[in-house]
Amino acid sequence: MSTTFKRKTEDFICENCGKQAMGNGYTNHCPACLWSKHVDIHPGDRASECGGKMKPTDVETKAGESILVHECVLCGHRKKNKVSPDDSYEQVIEVTKRK
């Protein structure tokens, strides 16, 4: 199994809030509520059998970039993803308040 990133341009309906998300090949979470889905083992491979929803649990800053931390509500898998310019700024702030 390759650990190389596989770019997939996919639109999806968020399983958490029901909003339509337009994919750009790097989109991996809903820009409205920031929730994700545990579908990958390696970015873009869609090889995970878990399929659990991934809750945004934290926001970290690295080299001036904001990074969302997601945790799967089914298996506990944790994944970090960059905050996108399309993401709800208000939701990013809400996640930072949960600390």
Image: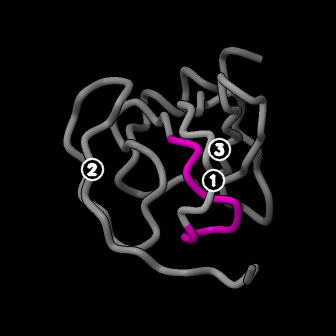
Label 1 element class: loop
Q: Mark 3 points at which residue?
A: 68
Q: In the displayed image of the protein, which residue is found farthest to the left?
A: 20
Boundaries of the magenta span: 37-45
Q: Quadrant of the C terminus?
A: top right
Label 2 element class: strand
C-alpha gap between disc 2 and disc 3: 19 Å
Identity, as a three-letter code, of the amino acid under mark 3: Leu
Q: Which of 21 and 88 is in front in this view?
A: 21
Q: Where is residue 3 in the image (x, y as percent from the top left)?
A: 75, 79
Q: Which of 50 and 67 is in front in this view?
A: 50
Q: Which of 53 and 97 is in front in this view?
A: 53
N-terminal of the pair, mark 1 or mark 3, is: 1
Q: Where is residue 58 in the image (x, y as percent from the top left)?
A: 72, 31
Magenta: main secondary structure: loop
Closest to the camera, between mark 2 and mark 1, is: 1
N-terminal of the pair, mark 2 or mark 1, is: 2
Q: Quadrant of the N terminus?
A: bottom right
Q: Is residue 33 magenta?
A: no
Q: Does the magenta stretch include residue 44?
A: yes
Q: Mark 2 points at which residue?
A: 12
Identity, as a three-letter code, of the amino acid under mark 1: Ser
Residue in the image at 53% along x and 62% along y: 46
Residue in the image at 73% along x and 48% along y: 79
Identity, as a three-letter code, of the amino acid under mark 2: Phe
Picture colour scheme? one colour
Q: Name the residue under label 1.
A: 48
C-alpha gap between disc 1 and disc 3: 20 Å
Does residue 71 appear left or right of residue 18 in this picture?
right
Q: Is residue 66 above or below residue 25?
A: above
C-alpha gap between disc 2 and disc 1: 17 Å
Residue in the image at 73% along x and 83% along y: 2
